[in-house]
Image (cartoon, rainbow, N blue to C red):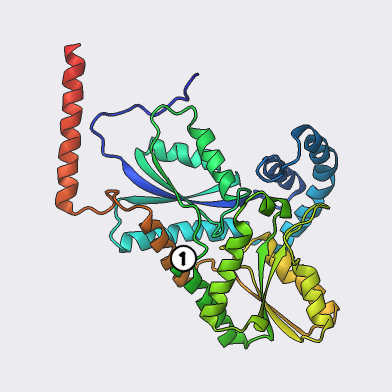
Amino acid sequence: MSFAKEPPYQHGNVGSSAVVLVNLGTPDEPTRGAVRRYLKQFLSDPRVVEIPRAVWWFILNGVILPFRSGQSAKKYASIWTADGSPLRIHTQSQAMLLHEALQARGHTEVTVAMAMRYGTPSLPDVLARLKADGCERIAILPAYPQYSGTTTGSIWDAVFDHYKKIRNIPELRFIRNYHDEEGYIEALRQNILTHWEQHGRGEKLVMSFHGVPKRTLLLGDPYHCECLKTARLLAARLKLREDEYLVTFQSRFGKAEWLQPYTAPTVQKLAQDGVRRIDVICPGFTSDCLETLEEIAMEVRHDFISNGGKDFHYIPCLNESPAWIAGLAEIAEQHMIGWPTMTTPSQRAERQQDADTGRERALALGAGQ
């Protein structure tokens, strides 16, 4: 087995620590070609589509990519900003603010980087850059609060694949989920209350999570259960009765049965039953993206209004809210316990002296050979 070329190893170095915030990904631009490249990488992941590879190859390349790329490009164009993709903008801002929050908590020896599972900046590229910078401890923090093999599991695959050809692997810690973490639930609560204070409150609160095929639940994926727990904890924190909120699942793809109830039909039924105003939030997304800004705030809004509803309020994702950045910092902090992330000036001087001594010993050994 041949190993990838690595930065030259320096004996006595005291490596740094890093947190890598990993989101799903986004096309580089809202064009047919860019969207096609992104979708090909995304939909070629066997974690995402569990159809026999040979069969899926023909479906993907012969049907989906030729027809869906153009349609998706139009949808991306409808939410694109002057600064680019909303998902990339929010994730990059979250990474920067998380770094500042950790620094304020005393973790001065920690770097925070942003990576995408699909698209750019790619997770392997970010990991390689951190190694080149001398990072020896890395905590992988998915942007997905609820664990699923289709999302978080795929990140693990990418990390392990990257390090297969790396000789000197850094210490790795993986943050599996945080669907019931205090900081996450509290940030959601504050986000909703802030919206209600500014815009009033609807008759129903719809919590729409991204869907996955029902088959994943039957095979043991915990995603469905973790979504329901998030909803239950959030409803309790908001003091909602059971008839005041609903849990639904969006973004169904293909003909197979997915987790139910589906968001769009549920919203249509609410309007047909005489509900005049609903509020919709997507707790499983920590950054606004195509699925929230276009699918929910545009398409599902149209479904509600066209079926007799009057007021549809989409509550934005956590994005850069201060409560969420504080929650992220708490989550990251929990998973760095034992790492040398805090140093005083005297400790830094001592560590540098140890590093210098290590280099001198290595040079002496080399000279004696």
Q: Which residue occupies the foreground of this view, 363 or 341? A: 341
Query: Label 1: how many residues lie within 10 Å, few (<14), some (14-19) or many (20+)?
Result: some
Identify the residue at image location x=71%, y=71%.
297
Q: Which residue occupies the foreground of this view, 216 or 279? A: 216
- In the image: residue 323, left or right of residue 64: left
Q: Determine whether 140 is above or below 224 in the image.
A: above
Residue 263 position in % (x across, y down): 74, 68
Residue 302 position in % (x across, y down): 80, 73
Quadrant position of residue 349: top left
- In the image: residue 61, left or right of residue 3: right
Say if residue 18 shows up in the picture.
Answer: yes
Q: Quadrant of the C terminus?
A: top left
Q: Determine whether 328 is above or below 117 in the image.
A: below
Q: Which residue occupies the foreground of this view, 32 or 305? A: 305
Residue type pointed to by label 1: Glu
Q: Determine whether 312 is above or below 299 in the image.
A: below
The number of numbered badges drawn on the structure is: 1
- In the image: residue 171, left or right of residue 319: left
Quadrant position of residue 241: bottom right
**Residue position for label 1:** 181
Mark 1 element type: loop
Q: Determine whether 109 is above or below 358 in the image.
A: below
